[in-house]
Image: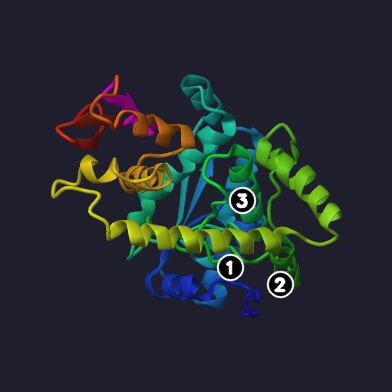
């Protein structure tokens, strides 16, 4: 029963989860089923709960996914949390795509229920193929370079399968005689990430004559190391005043490249989401004392306001 973990399983994240417990995002697909089984049966983590979101997108198929997850958790003796959300209606109301609305609901639900874990960890089943798609997606958007997901991030999200391929996960499940649910919408090519998975990555593999997934993941990891080093260096610079506001006399004397890095770091440290280069440039434009405008709206409902040689971020209701 306790077959070994895949060779690239992120052992540090797994050990942390095994010691402290976690809320596992469980869709019923092969990846999340494998993660739950690995944590429960191989690492023998007893302090687990599983959270499933029924997006109400695929009718009876979505209901069958929910029942599969409930049955799996009952077999494993894992507490099961389920939330039903009419994502098509939410998408229509908010103007978000189905994919964006579903993702927003998932993460909101995970964070609402993370208190069920002792340390508040959330365990998600993103794997190496997901990582490669994320890298390509971010590069194609031109928003933040080849940024990638982290095995452990500052929000307490853990991704122990991030270096394990989809095929390795499939082989591991089949060797154990386990089943899973397949989401039919993953085959639709009108969703950007699905097109990357089904069309772009196979073409890249053919063009390069090899599997580019580990190459993309390795490149993203190197980029992340460089970005982390820059973040560490920026924390040593006097870019903020004692109240945490951006100190403009220091920032404005720096080169454009360093100013952009400082602004991006400052926005991200305050939780501003979806920071594109255009966002950074818009903030940079209001920093000089003779700038036409002294405030701009930012993603996530934030306001950037310049006054008295300082820049502060706040939400409109503050």
State the SS at label 2: helix
Q: Position of residue 90 (x, y in %)?
A: 49, 26
**Cα separation between marks 1 and 3:** 28 Å
Mark 2 and 3 residues: CB-CB less than 8 Å, in contact? no
* Residue 89 falls left or right of residue 250: right
The N terminus sits in image quarter:
bottom right
Disc on the earlier residue, 2 or 1: 1
State the SS at label 1: helix
Q: Which mark is residue 135?
A: 3
How many neighbours does mark 3 have within 10 angstroms: few (below 14), some (14-19), or many (20 or more)?
many
State the SS at label 3: helix
* Residue 186 falls left or right of residue 289: right
- Residue in the image at 86% along x and 54% along y: 206
Q: Position of residue 210 (x, y in %)?
A: 82, 62
Residue that carries the numbered disc 1 in the rendered image: 37
Q: Position of residue 75 (x, y in %)?
A: 57, 64
**Cα separation between marks 2 and 3:** 31 Å
Q: Image height check: is 67 above or below 62?
A: below
Asked if the stretch drawn in magenta spans residue 74, the answer is: no
Taking depth in this image into account, of 25 and 54 the one nearest to the observer is 25
Disc on the earlier residue, 2 or 3: 3
In this view, the mark in front (1 or 3): 3
Give the residues in magenta.
293-302
Residue that carries the numbered disc 2 in the rendered image: 176
Q: Is residue 37 visible?
A: yes
Q: Image height check: is 125 above or below 175?
A: above
**Cα separation between marks 2 and 1:** 10 Å
Mark 1 and 3 residues: CB-CB less than 8 Å, in contact? no
* Residue 156 falls left or right of residue 177: left
Mark 2 and 1 residues: CB-CB less than 8 Å, in contact? yes
């Amino acid at each position: 029963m306790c077959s070994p973990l895949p060779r690239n399983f992120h052992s540090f994240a797994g050990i942390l989860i095994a010691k402290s417990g976690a809320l596992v995002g469980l869709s019923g697909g092969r990846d999340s089923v494998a993660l739950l089984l690995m944590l429960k049966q191989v690492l023998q983590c007893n302090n687990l709960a599983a959270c499933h979101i029924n997006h109400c997108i695929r009718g009876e198929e979505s209901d069958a996914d929910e029942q599969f997850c409930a049955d799996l958790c009952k077999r494993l003796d894992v507490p099961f949390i389920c939330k039903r959300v009419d994502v098509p209606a939410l998408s229509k109301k908010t103007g978000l795509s189905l994919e964006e609305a579903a993702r927003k609901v998932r993460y909101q639900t995970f964070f609402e229920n993370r208190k069920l874990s002792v340390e508040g960890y959330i365990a998600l089943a993103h794997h190496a193929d997901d990582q490669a798609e994320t890298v390509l997606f971010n590069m194609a958007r031109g928003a933040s370079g080849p940024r990638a997901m982290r095995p452990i991030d500052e929000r307490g999200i853990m991704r122990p399968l991030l270096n394990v391929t989809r095929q390795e996960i499939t082989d591991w499940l089949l060797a154990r005689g386990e089943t899973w649910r397949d989401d039919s919408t993953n085959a639709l090519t009108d969703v950007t990430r699905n097109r990357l998975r089904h069309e772009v990555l196979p073409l890249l593999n053919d063009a390069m004559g090899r599997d580019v997934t580990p190459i993309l993941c390795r490149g993203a990891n190197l980029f992340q190391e460089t970005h982390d080093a820059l973040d560490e260096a920026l924390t040593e610079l006097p870019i903020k005043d004692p109240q945490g506001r951006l100190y403009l006399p220091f920032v404005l004397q720096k080169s454009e490249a360093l100013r952009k890095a400082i602004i991006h770091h400052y926005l991200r440290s305050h939780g501003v989401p979806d920071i594109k280069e255009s966002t950074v440039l818009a903030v940079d434009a209001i920093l000089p004392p003779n700038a036409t405008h002294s405030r701009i709206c930012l993603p996530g409902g934030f306001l950037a306001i310049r006054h008295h040689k300082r820049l502060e971020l706040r939400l409109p209701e503050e």
